[in-house]
Amino acid sequence: MSKLPKLSLAALLLFFALAGRTEQLRMVADEWPPYVDPTAAGGGLAIDLVSAVFSRAGYTTQLTVDDWSRDLEGANIGVYDVVANIWYTDERARYLDYSDPYLVNDVRFVKRKWTDIEFEDYGDIRGLRIGMVKNYGYPSGFLRAGGLLKIANDTLVEALTELVEGQCDLVIDDKHVLEYTAKRYLPESESRLEFLPRPVGLEQLHIAVSRANPNHARIVDDFNRALKAMKNDGTYGRILDAHNYRP
């Protein structure tokens, strides 16, 4: 039998090393199209990307899509190992170990067209009613801003419906998510909505591993290394292209 080339042997050794320690992670996310969408290819951009990174790192994932508040509660007590799509807050970092960011979210306000609302600083929107989703980690400046009536909804669809019906003045979320949600769930009203041009903030999107998992630090390190490798070899960019994603 002829000898295997050294490169092939090294590749085989790496394969068996990864196979020998394959670990399944219980991953959770809230439905947040186009990033998390069970009806889309790969489960949406974030799920497709995160699953690929974990696969590169030698892990398999079992995904549950649930309400955001239950996602956080489950991760806190260790029912889930990984939250797939999450922004950083100090409070959450007490029970979650965050990865390096894998995407950046452009967080915006959306209003009804023809309403006279401008946003350069929070003084411009003092006294206005802002629709948001419960327990989301919005930009710190927004969370600290006083003089705003912040209306917490269970879902973004509820918040946008209230905006269309005049029950609030603005809604805040990622620009791509707002566009997608309005187009999919409120198609008759989409043309009546308009983004304010100034971003509220650029929020980094992470995975976070429950600190209840004794291997949380290793899992995060493995994810970070695999993410870096995928960016270097072009795999990361190809996944973004497959979802027609442009920052």
Image: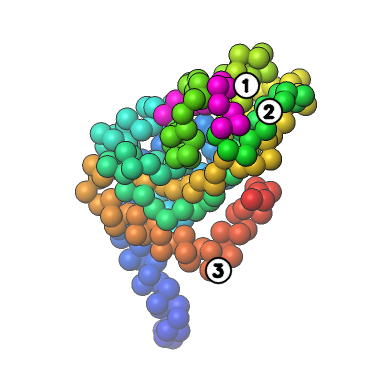
Lower sequence index among marks 3 and 1? 1
Question: Image check: 208 left or right of 95?
Answer: right
Tell me the crowding category of disc 1: few under 14, some 14 to 19, or many 20 or more residues within 10 angstroms, Cα based: many
In the rendered image of this protein, does residue 104 appear above or below residue 2? above
The residue carrying mark 1 is: 169
Looking at the rendered image, the disc whose residue lies closer to the viewer, 2 or 3, is 2
**Protein image colouring:** rainbow
Tell me the crowding category of disc 3: few under 14, some 14 to 19, or many 20 or more residues within 10 angstroms, Cα based: few
- As measured in the structure, the alpha-carbon distance from the residue carrying label 3 to the one carrying label 1 is 45 Å
* Three-letter code, disc 3: Asp
Q: Nearer the viewer, residue 123 or 171?
A: 123
Q: Is residue 131 magenta?
A: yes
Mark 2: which secondary structure? loop
Q: Is residue 80 magenta?
A: no
Mark 3: which secondary structure? helix
| Region of the chain picked out in magenta, as a range | 123-135
Image quarter for residue 165?
A: top right
- As measured in the structure, the alpha-carbon distance from the residue carrying label 2 to the one carrying label 3 is 45 Å
The residue carrying mark 3 is: 233
- As measured in the structure, the alpha-carbon distance from the residue carrying label 2 to the one carrying label 1 is 9 Å
Q: Nearer the viewer, residue 71 or 137?
A: 137
The residue carrying mark 2 is: 117
User: Where is the N terminus found, in terms of image quarters?
Assistant: bottom left
Residue lying at the far front of the rendered structure = 123
Lower sequence index among marks 2 and 1? 2
Image quarter for residue 81?
A: top left
Q: Residue at left 21%, top 48%?
A: 214
Q: Residue 225: x and y, percent?
A: 41, 63
| Number of dots carrying numbers | 3
Q: Residue at left 66%, top 54%?
A: 241
